[in-house]
Image (cartoon, coloured by chain):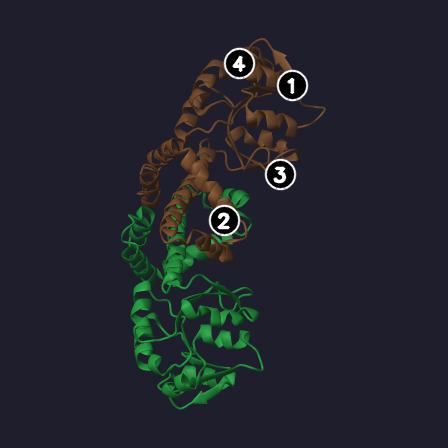
Chain colours: A brown, B green
């Protein structure tokens, strides 16, 4: 079986390490790639084609994992050459998933949950053809949500609305605790009920959010737009907090 | 050493079970108590005085644990008779703590964190005399915050602002997930990163909050009032969510 890769960032680099089988060959191309990516491809030792068009033609499964803003363009350019499954792993909205489905026949909407280089990343998939990817469960925990395209994208947004709002709440509460000189005690007291890793996990959430607040704000805006039938009081407050 | 108890609810009933020593005698009174409380006192086998005034006079440590709204009245009535430490374990605001300190000489502000009948409840204390209660660490994990009265009350409010806003966030996110028929998947996907007990803990938070939403709203209002110098965007959103 041949798996073609459009993109060779952290996710796909790690995926080629996780999916190890004599029966699977990975293909990609160095066409228009950055110097850094070409180096990574050469180091990985996977097979290289001159063009991504050729990668798409030769593959049984084509995986797109680039930046969210390129996902649609990649689908338009190469989707028509993919004869098998087209697995989109970009962090895209349900709306973009539907747009992509107009250019791709056998689209599977997917997401890696958990850090790809951790012990337990999971692959969530949806779409009518997603059954054909369940063999990947041998290499990475693989969970089919449903036949309906877009549900993995919705699930990612639901997850994101929880984690980002939680970070905003942690930022606000530790700010207040600091004003009373009780930040350490605040973490201590919550550790009793929230678990031993509460302090470390919370500080990592707070720093990650404050260091990427523009991107996090944009993602919260995307969530509010997608779930526009719901009032989302907490998510809107989180957006306001991050823009403070 | 004699420890007098004003109140004999869940917290003090359990405390007499946790603090087991030949050198410690517990006292209380059945004066004006409910039938149910009198039964609990008789069952416990602790020493009974005719009046709470006598309990206060006879005790080295007097503990008040009633309802928050009675805390000040109890302090006014019996504080003047307490010759030793007066430990207030009621769930009161920093403001009420300061009012109580006008009627009580050796006030220690305290709180039990974690379920009192769990494996690991903790006693948080503050106030100049709180060092004298550190011997309790032999029976229940005891942590002195500082000499400053009111800091345990502030810490409780900080903790409460986190846990109650988190519940509001969980309510909102699961409502949205339900609309897409993805509630189970929402819990599954977060379990991967938030820990195996995420679903059970979250459902317990949601149910507990929805079943007591009036009281939880009042507590959020108290937090907003106490921390009035801070804007508290997330806590105000939580209040709005619970009042929806």
B118 is higher (above) or lower (below) than A35: below
Residue with the mark numbered 3: A119
Disc 1 chain ID: A
Q: Nearer the viewer, mark 3 or mark 1?
A: 1
Q: Nearer the viewer, mark 2 or mark 4?
A: 2
| Residue A25 located left or right of residue A230 | right
Residue B137 occupies which quadrant of the picture?
bottom right
- Sort mark 2 into few (<14), some (14-19) or many (20+) by Cα contacts within 10 Å: some
Q: Secondary structure at mark 1?
A: helix
Give the x, y percent position of residue B178: 41, 45
Residue with the mark numbered 2: A199
Earlier in the chain: of badge 3 and badge 2, it is 3
Give the x, y percent position of residue B166: 40, 51
Q: Nearer the viewer, mark 2 or mark 1?
A: 2
Q: Nearer the viewer, residue B27 or A58?
A: B27
Give the x, y percent position of residue B188: 52, 44
Q: Is residue B74 visible?
A: yes
Earlier in the chain: of badge 4 and badge 1, it is 4
**Res A33 label:** 4
Residue with the mark numbered 1: A43
Earlier in the chain: of badge 2 and badge 1, it is 1
Disc 4 chain ID: A
Whole-angstrom CA distance, mark 4 to mark 1, is 15 Å
Earlier in the chain: of badge 3 and badge 1, it is 1
Earlier in the chain: of badge 4 and badge 3, it is 4
Q: Are marks 3 and 1 in contact (CB under 8 Å)?
A: no
Q: Are marks 4 and 1 in contact (CB under 8 Å)?
A: no
Q: Residue at x 54, y 49 (%)?
A: A197
Disc 3 chain ID: A
């Amino acid at each position: 079986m041949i798996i073609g890769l459009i993109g060779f960032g952290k996710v796909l680099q790690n995926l080629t390490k996780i999916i190890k089988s004599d029966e699977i060959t990975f293909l990609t191309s160095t066409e228009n790639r950055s110097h850094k990516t070409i180096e990574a491809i050469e180091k990985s030792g996977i097979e290289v084609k001159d063009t991504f068009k050729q990668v798409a033609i030769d593959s049984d499964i084509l995986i797109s994992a680039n930046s969210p803003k390129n996902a649609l363009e990649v689908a338009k350019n190469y989707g028509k050459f993919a004869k098998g499954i087209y697995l989109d792993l970009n962090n895209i909205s349900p709306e973009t998933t539907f747009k992509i489905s107009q250019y791709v026949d056998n689209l599977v909407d997917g997401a890696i949950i958990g850090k790809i280089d951790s012990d337990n990343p999971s692959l969530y998939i949806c779409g009518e053809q997603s059954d054909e990817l369940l063999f990947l469960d041998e290499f990475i925990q693989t969970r089919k949500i449903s036949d309906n395209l877009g549900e993995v994208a919705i699930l990612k947004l639901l997850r994101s609305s929880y984690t980002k709002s939680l970070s905003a709440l942690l930022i606000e509460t530790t700010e207040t605790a600091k004003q009373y000189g009780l930040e350490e005690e605040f973490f201590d007291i919550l550790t009793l009920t929230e678990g031993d890793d509460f302090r470390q996990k919370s500080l990592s959430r707070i720093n990650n959010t404050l260091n990427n607040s523009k991107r996090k704000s944009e993602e919260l805006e995307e969530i509010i737009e997608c779930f526009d039938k719901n009032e989302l009081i907490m998510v809107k407050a989180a957006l306001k907090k991050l823009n403070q």
